[in-house]
Amino acid sequence: SFGILTSETMKLRSGTSKGEGNGDVDASSGMDPGMDSRVITIFGKKFNFVILVTHFNIFLYAACFWIQTGTLPYLTKKLGVDAVIYGYLQTTFAVVQLCGGPLYGRFGDLFGGQAALVLAFGAAAISYAILGVSYSIPVLFLSRLPSVFMHAMQGGQMVVTDMADSKNRADALGKLGLSYGIGMVVGPFIGGLVTKYSSEQTAALVAAAGSVLSILIVLIFIPKQTKMAHVEVKASEKSASSIFSIKKIMSLLAQPGALVLLTVKAVSGVPIGIFQSMFAILAMEKFGLAPEQNGFMMSYVGVITMIMQGFGLGILTKRFKEMSLITLSSFVLVWAYLLLAFVQDVTQLCLVMFPLCFGLTIKNVIISSALTHTVPDEDTGAMLGLNMAVNSLIRTVSPTVGGIMLNTWGYPSFGYVGFVASSLVFIYLYFIRKEPKDSNIHVSHTT
């Protein structure tokens, strides 16, 4: 899944390069006629070089994102931002990402993986650069606006979905999460050190420089079109009206199983979204963590997620059906959130993070994979955009709701909300849903 080519993938790739059943692939399609030559051998195994490059870019994206994420709370505090304004700042970021997610996915379907990744890394570079020169609250808010197209993880998922064989898609997406997890470990550590020896603004500028490097890597190594099956796109479809098509979005939601998957993702994601939105404040006020200690804590969470996505997920997907794994993750989250409500110190929090990350990782990756199977190949990017839009919608409401919960009911309320939400999802999946418990909940399409 780190770009390892199975026999199925090799046959599909060979058929694509020869134009079998689709007509010859020429330069105008954006597909590299020499795609088969983009295979390298490491320790006797063949790897897809494009997917390997995508993994490195996702690592770099995650590192840069978490450099600025880890330093942002301390930069805002330095500029005199209180908890309410900080919540507004987080909400602004979530709203613009919510608006851009589905559009970005449709853009990738129409213009290809290379253009989509360049757009994402360009937006990230601009956002971090503005943050790096932020010495007032208005400029802080301005730095959030370019993030409307800052969807590099979604872009990476599009490339992997296009190039990995269907049977191993969940594992392939999980491995991409492993690369993100490594960046999540490295980023806060670097951000904490840069902040300690320089400033928060310098850390943001370092993140901007890393994003510019990613743009160069994409332009050099990622082909314009990454879909294995040649997809004809009419010139009339490459327009603003096509990208902003509400009709297209509604047709995706109407696909069998899609709305159920997105609903389960939303209900399960609200509790952790609320907790994450308030964690920066909790780290300082409840747990008394300094900037570098907060960075270490986020790195610790990244390590757990990395291990689960890189190794555990592949084992589970080979032994269990997707429906069973989603149900299992809901059951684990029920008790993980209940334990979270009783956490009193950092040590206890670290222990609870194991089952919490386990359940969330399984659910997020499996749902992402299942969603790409509900639509034809030419629409996988748009569906991944809707998947990301759910995350953005959660982040939109989470800061406000989290602030109210923290001020009204205190820290334990985060765990109790997660307990109730996960219990409802588990009851629905295990007791109410009519499909067999060991069946997949998606319908495969071929083009």
Image: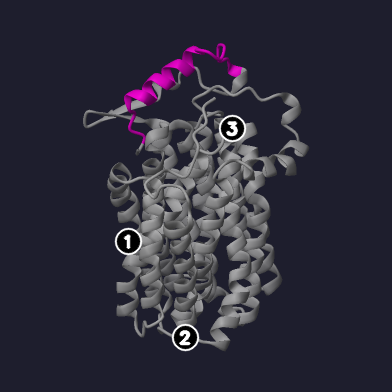
Mark 1 packing: few (<14 Cα in 10 Å), some, or many (20+)? many
Between 253 and 123, the one lying in front of the other is 253
**Is residue 302 something that shows in the picture?**
no
Q: Quadrant of residue 91?
A: bottom right
Q: Are marks 1 and 2 in contact (CB under 8 Å)?
A: no
Picture coordinates of residue 299, whole percent (x, y): 36, 64
Q: Marks 3 and 1: in contact by CB < 8 Å? A: no
The residue nearer to you, when weighing 263 against 92, is: 263
* Picture quarter with the N terminus: top left
Q: Residue under label 2, please give it.
A: 285
- The mark found on residue 220 in the picture is none
Three-letter code for the amino acid on which mark 3 is drawn: Gly
Q: Is residue 237 above or below residue 355?
A: above
**Quick one: label 1 or label 3, which is nearer the N terminus?**
3
Q: Which mark is residue 304?
A: 1
Give the mark, 1 or 2, whose residue is nearer the N terminus: 2
Residue count near mark 3 (Cα–Cα under 10 Å), binned few <14, some 14–19, many ≥20: many
Residue lying at the far left in this picture: please name it.
43
Q: Amino acid at mark 1?
A: Ile
Q: Residues within 10 Å of mark 2 (few under 14, many from 20)?
A: few
Q: Which residue is mark 3?
A: 112
Question: What SS does tag 3 mark?
Answer: loop
Query: Mark 2 falls on what kind of element?
Result: helix
Q: Amino acid at mark 2?
A: Glu
Q: Residue at x 33, y 45 (%)?
A: 317
Q: Secondary structure at mark 1?
A: helix
Distance of label 1 from label 3 (alpha carbons): 33 Å
- What span is in magenta? 3-27
Q: Which residue does the image show at 55% across and 60% down from the upper left?
A: 266
Q: Is residue 13 magenta?
A: yes
